[in-house]
Structure formats: structure tokens, C-alpha cells
Amino acid sequence: MKKRYVLLFACSLLLSGCGANSEKEIKPTPSTKQTIEQNNEIDLKKISTKLEVTEANGLVTMKYSLRNSDDIPANFTFPSSQIIDFTIKNDKGEVVYQSSKDMSYAQALTNIEVPNESAKVWEEQVNFPDNSIPYGNYEVTANFVATAVNDKKLNGEITALTQPLSYHKLTTINENGSKVVISGENGHYEIKGTYLSEQDEIFYSVEDGHNNLIDETILPVKIKSGSVNLLDFSLDIPKESLPNNGVVTLIIYEKNQDDQVTKSINVALQQFE
């Protein structure tokens, strides 16, 4: 009888032990594929972009740069060989140029790798005169058209960039070694160049032949080296002050101790008629 109880007790211990083992939680370990995917995921906050737009003699250069500050490479996928879609609109919002419409691209999947801690730059140029694009103010937008990075879909995380562009006829005045370059119209004008003078103070004013549009003001000199004064500033005149007929003229001049003008150059900013 004692043997039977001992046997039953041993069986019950064995069964309870099996039950405990069957109830023990088994934690799954991540698969190799999951680990690779986690290690390959880019932190999009570490992707930065920049747009630079310059214009010289009607040739507009658009530079788009993308920097990958993550510690792994970024492999971008594109639906075609196009990387950046540049769009240029005039001040009425009308598209005057767009890469995707004015350029040809191979219609095949394209992969571009940007190594970790490095950047890539893409550049595109548009010749405004060749494309019959008139003088005026424009807006340039650059859209990075990748659809995925490291096999993960992009949903607008890399946003488009926009920069203003001013394209105006240049007027150059060369006089007594000074060179002044003017661009702009309708009240906004950019002044660049050099003015030769030993004076510490140089002045300017703007008139239309009848009225002073800007009274006497000290000429803003960006850099002075000896007698060379580097100019780089802008003028803004309210449109209601501009004449219907006449020439808006910038006058740069010097004065002596008796407040008499000793030297001056006249620069025509714009002819109104």
C-alpha cells in the first residue's frame, strides 16, 4: 500500500513539473532578416538639403545638395534617371520651365547612394535668353523625386525647396576707374561694383530730374581697401513715387569741408515713358 502512494506521489510531481515547463514563456529571437532591416534603416532627420540659385548674363544655375549625416549609407531609388525636378515660375505663378517637361530622362529604375557623413550635389542650368524667358522676378522650386531610401518608401519626408530669382537687364557704368553695375526695375535696384575714392565718407542720392526720390545718404561701402570701395547694396523706392516719364538716376558724389560737391558720377537706374 505504501508503495502505491509513493508511486502516485512521484507521478504527480512529474506531471506538475511537465506543466510548469509547458507554461514557461518562450521569447522569440529576432530573425537575421529583421536585424538587417533595423540596421539598414536611415534616420531621415539626419538627411539635410540645400538649394542655391545664381544668375549671370541670363544663364541660371540651380544647385541642389543633399547631405547624409547618418552613420550608414543612404541608397535612394528613383522611378527614372531624373533626380531633381526643377520648376521655375514667374511672378504670376505661371511655369516658364520644368525639368520633367523640358528634359529627357531614361525610363528605368535608378539607384543613387549617398555615403554616410557625406553629400552629393546636382546641378542644372537654364539659359533664359535661349528659352525666350523675359526679365522679371521668378521662383525656383527643387523637388527630390526619390520614391524610397534603403528599400523604405518615402512619403514626402524630403520636402521641396524654394528660392527667389531676380533676372534683370544689367547697366554698367565705367567712369574714372570706378565701375558700377545696376540691375532691377520698378523701384527695386541692386547696386554692385567699385567706386574709387580716398574719402572716408561718400554720399549718394536718387532723383528723377524733378524730385528727390532718396535724399542725401552715406554710401554703404561693403569693403574698403585703400582707394577701392566695394559696393553691394539695394535701393527701394515706393512705386507711387516713381515718375510716369523720365529717368530715375543714382548720383554718387564726394564733398569737401565746405560741403561742396567735388566729384560725382551719374548712373541711370531706369527709363520711364
Image: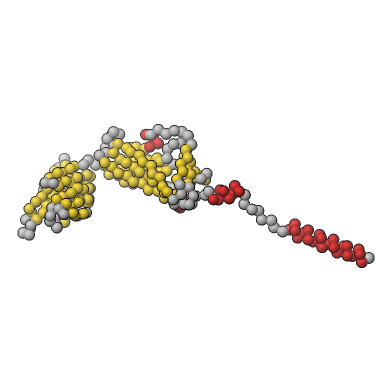
Judge left or right: residue 110 versus residue 181.
Answer: right
Colour mode? secondary structure
Q: Nearer the viewer, residue 63 or 237?
A: 63
Q: 272 or 72, which lies in front?
A: 72
Side (left or right) of 5 relative to 245: right
How many numbered marks appear?
0
Residue nearer the viewer, 20 or 118? 118
The residue depicted at 44 percent of the width and 41 percent of the height is 145
The quadrant in which residue 172 appears is top left
Looking at the picture, how far across and down is residue 132, in whole percent?
28, 34
Residue 26 on image: x %, y %: 69, 56
Residue 36 visible at all: yes
Drawn side of residue 57 relative to residue 36, left or right: left
The percent coordinates of residue 97 (x first, y second) are 34, 37
> Relative to 9, does residue 97 appear above or below in the rendering?
above
Q: Residue at x 81, y 59 (%)?
A: 15
- Res 218 quadrant in image: bottom left
Q: Is residue 111 left or right of residue 94?
A: right
Considering only vertical position in the picture, is 53 above or below 224? above
Which residue extends farthest bottom? 2
Quarter of the figure with the N terminus: bottom right
Position of residue 219 measured from the top left corner of the image (x, y, whole percent): 17, 54
Residue 268 seen in this snapshot: no
Q: Quadrant location of residue 170?
A: top left
**Residue at horizontal 92%, vertical 66%?**
2
Say which quadrant the C terminus sits in: top left
Vertical position of residue 49 compared to residue 78: above or below: below
Residue located at (58% from left, 50% from top): 35
